[in-house]
Image (spheres, rainbow, N blue to C red):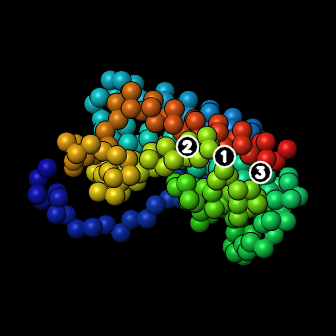
Amino acid sequence: MAWVKVNQPEEAIQIVVRDCCRQHSVDTHSPVDIYIRHARHVLTLGSPTELEGSATLGRLLLLGLVTGVETYFRTLLAGILRQCPISQRVAAEQTLSYGSVRYYPKQGVEAALFENASFSSSKEIKRMTEKMLGVDISSARSLMAAITEYERICHLRHAAIHAHGALTSVNASAIGVPGELAPASVSLEVGGLHGVARVCQSVVRAYNQELYGRMI
């Protein structure tokens, strides 16, 4: 690219919000069904040929899968709070901002409780489950094993978002990157992408079964 074009002065530009956003429609299916449909769609976007030719595509699809899991956690917890009187008493002391109460509809205001929550670590998932529902999941061994593996995926997601896929030493240590690959970056072909999808589905399935039993 010609240096004249590279060094052109900046422009005063603003995005047109209506070109980027539309009104959110509430999906009435169960959170686990919404996740499965979302994950299946994400996987259709990553053919072997396209993934081999674009590391960026693999990282974007990784982001899509993890986003689906985090949305599942938020949607499920909010849904339980709408229906379970015991959980409602547990979460009764949580505060909401006036802005969030104005923004969300009355039948969906529970979503505001999770605006500042991150479901990317085992510690935070355990904390939010107990804080909002009064349920301690630390003794559920199979679930905690699934969450621990999912946390490794979140380290890949962190690198994909913040550093064009380059893993920091913290990310690499948490994931267990072999020394001969250091320094490493996230690069997913079809086998790796499907492996990530299996880990994400495993944690969703395990959490769904555990919470279903606890709520009953």
Q: Residue most toward the right?
A: 85
* Residue appearing at x 52%, y 54% in the figure: 120
Alpha carbons under labels 3 and 1: distance apart: 22 Å
**Quarter in which the C terminus is drawn:** top right
Residue 58 visible in the shown view = yes
Q: Say whether residue 63 is left or right of residue 163.
A: right
User: Upstream in the sequence, badge 3 or badge 2?
Assistant: 3
Residue 204 visible in the shown view = no
Q: Say whether residue 3 is left or right of residue 127.
A: left
Q: Pointer 3: residues within 10 angstroms few (<14), some, or many (20+)?
A: some
Return the residue nearer the eye: 165 or 195: 195
Amino acid at circle 3: Gly
* Residue appearing at x 38%, y 32% in the figure: 192
Classify mark 1: helix, strand or loop: loop
User: Upstream in the sequence, badge 3 or badge 1?
Assistant: 3
The image position of residue 13, as x and y in percent, is 39, 65
**Would you name the residue on which mark 1 appears?**
140
| Vertical position of residue 40 compared to residue 151: above or below | above
| Vertical position of residue 97 compared to residue 205: above or below | below
* Residue appearing at x 82%, y 59% in the figure: 87
**Residue 19's disc number:** none
Alpha carbons under labels 1 and 2: distance apart: 9 Å
Return the residue nearer the eye: 141 or 110: 141
**Would you name the residue on which mark 3 appears?**
79
Classify mark 3: helix, strand or loop: helix
**Would you name the residue on which mark 2 appears?**
145
The image position of residue 2, as x and y in percent, is 11, 53
Q: Say whether residue 158 is left or right of residue 95.
A: left
User: Upstream in the sequence, badge 1 or badge 2?
Assistant: 1
Classify mark 2: helix, strand or loop: helix
